[in-house]
Image (cartoon, rainbow, N blue to C red):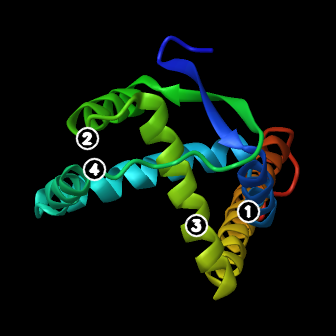
């Protein structure tokens, strides 16, 4: 682990973990990376909502109604989560503003991420996103291989010219 990362633990319901694993598999990334992505996106969404006052309104409604999230029934399992210190600082700042623990906010962000991804999956957005990501990676690989081949030909011609061979430039 680098000096810019810290490992925390988040407890999730076993059934949620299974759903998370299915989504990660479908997206072609690790469960860990999916959770980090969900947290990062969730923090960004809340930050945008805060700029127009939605976050404060949500907090006021929660406080007014004294809503408490009841834990899901069933077994929970702690999962290690390695987070960048900058992201962790954002989580801590937002958790403090919302009067939540780091764990509660992190778990909520992951749970909301699961719900959103499952909805997007039903309408095919994840399939398209994965295809576009894979297509982009394939194009990058083709370009890289093309550059390597061009450089190899150039190097071969330069070496051939140095030895008195044909040079087709």
Distance (Cα) linking label 2 and label 3: 21 Å
Labels 2, 4: front one: 4
Mark 2–mark 4 Cα distance, whole angstroms, equals: 13 Å
Q: Which mark is residue 23?
A: 1
Quarter of the C terminus within the rendering: bottom right
Looking at the image, do the residues carrying marks 4 and 1 touch, with CB atoms under 8 Å apart?
no
Percent across and percent down for residue 155 are 76, 46
Judged left or right of residue 2, residue 64 is left
- Front in this rendered view, residue 4 or 166: 4
Badge number at residue 115: 3
Task: Using the numbered discs, state the Cα–Cα distance from disc 4 to disc 3 in whole angstroms.
Answer: 23 Å
The mark that comes first in sequence, 2 or 3, is 2
* Residue under pointer 2: 98
In percent of the image, x 73 and y 46: which residue is there? 31
Kindly report the distance in space between the C-alpha atoms of the residues bearing marks 3 and 1: 10 Å
Residue drawn at the location 74% of the way across and 60% of the way down: 141
| Residue where numbered disc 4 is placed | 66
Earlier in the chain: of badge 2 and badge 1, it is: 1
- State which tag comes first along the sequence, 3 or 1: 1
Whether label 2 touches label 3, CB < 8 Å: no
| Disc number placed over residue 32 in the picture, else none | none
Q: Secondary structure at mark 1?
A: helix
Of marks 4 and 3, which one's residue comes earlier in the chain? 4
């Amino acid at each position: 682990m680098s000096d810019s990362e810290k490992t925390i633990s988040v407890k999730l319901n076993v059934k949620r973990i299974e759903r998370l694993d299915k989504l990660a598999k479908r997206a072609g990334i690790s469960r860990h990376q999916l959770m980090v992505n969900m947290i990062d996106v969730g923090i960004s969404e809340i930050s945008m909502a805060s700029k127009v006052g939605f976050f404060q309104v949500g907090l006021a409604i929660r406080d007014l109604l004294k809503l408490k999230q009841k834990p899901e029934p069933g077994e929970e399992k702690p999962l290690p989560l390695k987070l960048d210190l900058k992201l962790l600082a954002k989580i801590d700042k937002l958790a403090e503003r919302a009067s939540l623990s780091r764990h509660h906010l992190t778990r909520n962000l992951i749970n909301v991420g699961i719900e959103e991804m499952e909805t997007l999956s039903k309408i095919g957005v994840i399939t398209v996103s994965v295809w576009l990501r894979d297509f982009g990676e394939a194009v990058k690989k083709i370009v890289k291989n093309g550059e390597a081949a061009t450089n190899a030909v150039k190097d071969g011609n330069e070496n051939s010219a140095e030895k008195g061979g044909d040079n087709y430039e």
